[in-house]
Amino acid sequence: MDLRRWLEKELLRLAAQGEATAIGWLALVAARSEKELFPRSLALLRRFLQDDPFRYHRNAGALAVARWLADRCKLALPEDFERRYEQLLEEAFGLVALRSACVLLDAAQIYLIAHAVPESLKPSFLALLRQERQGRPYRRIIFAEALRLHEPSAERPDFELDRLDTQDLIAYGWQHALEGRFNQTLLERTLLASGHYYPLSKKGPVLHPFLQALLLETLLRYERHLALQDKSRVRSLDANSRAI
């Protein structure tokens, strides 16, 4: 089994177990980059929404993706969704000062939440994103990309590859993929570093679901990039043959 398919299988497994972060990221990545995976991810998201999803702050990311998808496909939201979702985020803002146990400071959650921010909270949310673009490289990348969903001209951070660890490399490769740039050296280093986590059946460290999702989307976009290059090459050859 290749890495991409293993990542899909692992995220589906975690989502089927009710892991909210996996559910949210899987649905987002599938909606943007893998249409064949989307029906299964949407079914898991629907099941998640049926089980009182507002109980925990850690569900905020998956709830945000559900809100984002509701405008794009036939996804029914729970009754009183808007009020309860906004209330959950307001409670989360109350925890920011504690600097711990707050989903709004969690790199695994913030990019998902950025897809569905209530208008009343948007000024505070954007201020938080600008302030929190600090710390580890992967965290700076995620918060910058969350901000760019609202401010496309916001600056993307840049790094020297030799200073990045596995988490950072995965996030940096994902950032490049979102831009449509595919650095072969970066991709090779990312895959080499990620080899310590694959497959999960071997005893060893576990890659966080959100990092699995970043790596999966990077690979999906890279495959699409290669496919488009092949099509372009074929069209070029065909045009040349007709010209002869």
Image: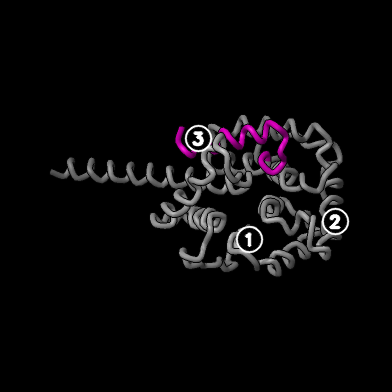
Horizontal side, residue 244 vs residue 62: left or right: left
Q: Can you identify the residue that label 3 sits on?
A: 5
Return the residue nearer the eye: 206 or 16. 206
Residue 80 x %, y %: 86, 41
- Of callouts 3 and 2, the N-terminal one: 3
Q: Quadrant of the C terminus?
A: top left
SS at badge 1: helix
The CA distance from mark 1 to mark 3 is 26 Å
The CA distance from mark 3 to mark 2 is 38 Å
Q: Amino acid at mark 1?
A: Arg
Q: Residues within 10 Å of mark 3 (few under 14, many from 20)?
A: few
> For residue 59, what is the image quadrant?
top right
Return the residue nearer the eye: 178 or 240. 178
**Residue range highlighted in magenta:** 1-23
Q: Amino acid at mark 3?
A: Arg
Q: Amino acid at mark 2?
A: Glu
The CA distance from mark 2 to mark 1 is 22 Å
Q: Can you identify the residue that label 2 sits on?
A: 90
- Of callouts 1 and 3, the N-terminal one: 3
